[in-house]
Every structure is written in C-alpha cells, then in structure tokens.
Image (spheres, helix red, strand yellow):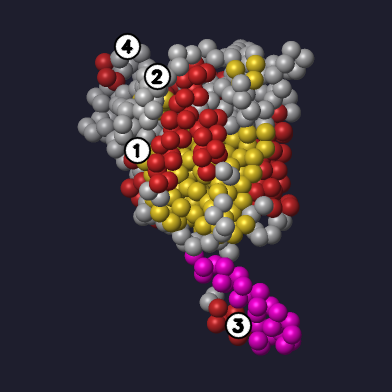
Amino acid sequence: MNRATRTSFLNTTLPGATAGALLMLVSAVCAAAEDVGTYQVGAASVVITPKVADDAPPVWLAGYGQGRQAEVLHDDIYARAVFVHDGRFGLAMVSCDLIGLFRDDVVKIREELGRLQLSPSIDYVLVSSTHTHAGPDTLGLWGPVGRTGVMPGYLEQVRTACVDAVRQAHRDARRGTLRIGTADVNHQAELIGDSRLPKVIDSQLTVIQARSDPGQTIVTWVNMPCHPEVLGSKNKQLSSDFPSTLRQYLETRFGGLAVCNSGSVGGLLSPREPKSNPFTNEPLPEDDIGRMMAYGRIIGRIAEGALDKAEPLNGSIRAASRAVLIPLWNPFYRLGGAIGVLQRPMLDASGQPVKMPQAATATATASTPAVGDLYLKTEISLIQIGTLQIAAVPGELYPELALGRFQEPQEPAADFPNAPLEPAIYPLMTGRFKMVIGLANDEIGYIIPKSQWDWSAPYAYGRKERQYGEFNSCGPEAAPRLMAAWRSLITQK
Ligand SMILES: [Zn+2]
C-alpha cells in the first residue's frame, strides 16, 4: 500500500480529528522508513559466565575431547545483542560466547520476546554463537563419558540473558546511521588457516558500525570465519577466546559496544598466530593466554582498517527463513540422543517426534547407519540490511559452500561419485556486501559438500584414515538439503 491509498482510506473512514492525528502518525512512520540512511539502533551486553569454583557444579569446557573441566575464569562470557529498526522492520541479533545452541533454545527465546510485544516491533530474532572452545558445554557432548556436560539450569540462564540483552538493546535504541567495511584477514599473513583437505579458506572479515546522530559509536559488529580456539585443547581457563581482546580493542578505540560473530568456520578454519604482530612488529607472547590476547588485538586492528575504508549502509531491513529437515546419519549423534547426552527432538521423515531411545540405539552402532529414518529440524535464513545480504547458517559451513569453490574434478576416493555440487551461498547473492553468520539459530555440526563426503575406505587424498569433519556432521545429506533450502529462499521459489 502506498501513502496515497492510506491517506484516502483514513480520510473516508475516520472522524476528522482522529484521522488528522493518525495521518500525522502515518506520515511520521513513512518519513522514518523513507529516510533510508537512518535507523533506530541499540546494543546491550549481559554476562553469562557460570561460576567456576570448588563449591559450584563442575563447568565442562566445550570442544575437543570430553571431560575437560574449567579450573579458573579468565574472562567473562556474554550474550550481546544488537537491535536495528528501519521504521517498518525490527531486527534483533544476539551473539553468545558459547560453542553453540540448539534450535529449541532459540525458539524459546523468540517466544519470550514475542510475548513482550515490544514497540517498535521486533520482527525477526537471530541467535548465534561465536563457537568458543573455552566456554561451557551447552550441547551436552563434553561432560564425563556417558553424561551430559550441560550444567543444570544453565541453558535457562542463557535464554534469560539473551532476552534481557535484546530488551535492553531495544530500550536504548536511538537514531543512528550504519557503515560497513571489509578486509581480507589473510592479506599480510595467513592468520586464518585450514587444517584439512582440500584447503579452502574464506578469510573475509566484515565490520559494521552504528553511530548515533551526535557521532557516538553505538556498536561495532565484527564477523569473521574462524574458530575461536587460540587457547587450544589443553586449556582449563574459561574464556571467550580471542573475541575478548578483539572486542576490547574496538571498544577502546571507538567507544560503544563491540559484538563478534563467526562466519563459515567449517573445514575447519582456525587461528594461525603469527610470530610477531604485523602492525607493531612486537613478538607474540609464548604462552597460550598471551597469544590469544595478542591475536584478538591484531584482528581488532584489521577491523579498524576495514572501518577506515567503510561506506554508508543504507536501505530497508528484511528477513526470511526456511525450516529444513536434516537426515541424521551420524552414529555418535544417534547414540548421544539415545542415551540422553544429546537433548534435542529427533523426528521422522514427516517431522513428527520419534520416541527415543529405541529408534536410535538400534542403528547407532551399525557400521553403515541409515539415512532417512531420523531427522533434525533446523532452519536457514536470509537477512537483508540495505545493500548487505546475510546468510544465517545453522552450524559450521564448509567454506566451499559459502564461496562456491568446490574441488573439481572430484577426489576419486570420495564416497559419492558424481554427486551434484550444491548451490552455494555467495554466488546466489545479489547484494553489494555478502556475509555468512555461522552457528546461527542452531548447531548441527559440520555442513560438508556431498561430493567430498569420505567415510568409507579407501580414503581421499591417499589418507590412511578418515578426516575429522565427517565425525562431527549430521551426515552426507545435510549440505544438499540445506543448500537446496537456501536456493529456494533466496530465489523465492
Ligand atoms: Zn567447530
């Protein structure tokens, strides 16, 4: 409906005074929406650090092997929220310093925010995780063998924090403008590496900054495709890993709040700490904590450089999602579901809940688990802020599925000869700026091109054993299903 139609509707159906007042209101809303360069923007941060102490329940650190108990707190972890409204559409984005959250928690956060009926509207809520490997277990996989690693009541605490962060960001929203810049993190040195074959790296850092009318920074938001895991598998300190000093650097430099997301981290893309800081030439400390902190500051400096060349981000906000059923092949996930370590609904092909543990135990240990008897429900989303398009992907996307850069011809020992290549994220985007947010609204593990899937011997690249990724993936049908949904979402078919 355009403005002329609205005006005539109001004039003909309402008494004069009411119509006049409403007309002013409509004009004000339209003016806000048509003033494409300004938004209402707010940001807020809520601590989600669990207590690490002898008199508190053990905190099991997520990532790597099981049973890694936190001994001490290094830096607080957070749920950080950004709220942006363009006069018509309100977008809330939360980033948590966590390994991941299952979709059920995200749905509960959305339901709670929906109940609050805030104005201006919150029309879409994205909840993502940075995937820190020094944070508490929120998925259940990293407790002592056979037991969930999730602390009692902790997920509820996280959900409440996410809701509170969005409420505060919404309450504090003020008129502001956005600017956006990008940088190649690997421009000077390989700071993001890939530890598997084929080596495919997405090294694009994107930074978006919101400033208020008087020129104060409201929020600086950084997206980067890299596992936050400088601290490594022997670490026993609770931490957000390098996002801690990355955010600190930007908050000191610009003021306001800094927020980090992780992009397409599958593959797996992880930090490569240089011997010395490429900006100051200072040698990096030897110890893990010192290197982690220095690495965050280096990335902060790269984000600052991207902002030096930033351009205005204008235009309307939109978001849309597609629900997807992913066949659950992974024998370890099935076993985890069967014994209650992995707590999320498992479904049949029609999306109806399947009673556990019978369905999973029968096939959990089979050498070739079935594809097509158990499913997980997840979602993929497309968010648009003016000339920026964002794919919100529910796990750890292999970078080839973001870039459309597949190994061709296919590796001869791969399991599915002639498997079709999936539609990829960036090639289908038309926006000037393109970005993937990984671990978004769910964590379903690695999303691997089917043409590269390699579980059965002989193994690809002449390897003597399987690669790591397949152990942490729902299965070979995850990428085809998810990327088909992506194509349907972005082409509106
Ligand atoms: Zn990972």
- In the figure, 437 relative to 140: above or below? below
Marks 2 & 3, CB-CB < 8 Å contact: no
Disc 4 versus disc 1: nearer the observer: 1
- 4 or 3: tag closer to the N-terminus: 3
Disc 3 versus disc 1: nearer the observer: 1
Pick the front one: 279 or 425: 279
Badge 3 amino acid: Thr
- Please tell me whether residue 31 belongs to the stretch shown in magenta: yes
| Most distant residue in the right direction | 55
Disc 4 versus disc 2: nearer the observer: 2
Residue behind mark 3: 7
Residue behind mark 4: 464
Q: Where's the N terminus, which quadrant?
A: bottom right
Respond yes or no on whether mark 3 lies under 8 Å from ligand 1. Answer: no
Badge 2 amino acid: Pro
Respond yes or no on whether mark 2 lies under 8 Å from ligand 1. Answer: no
Please report the bounds of the magenta region as a residue range: 10-36
- In the figure, 73 relative to 175: above or below? above
Alpha carbon separation for disc pair 3 and 1:
49 Å
Residue behind mark 2: 283
Secondary structure category for the residue under label 4: loop
Q: Main secondary structure of the magenta part?
A: helix
Residue at image coords 55%, 82%: 4
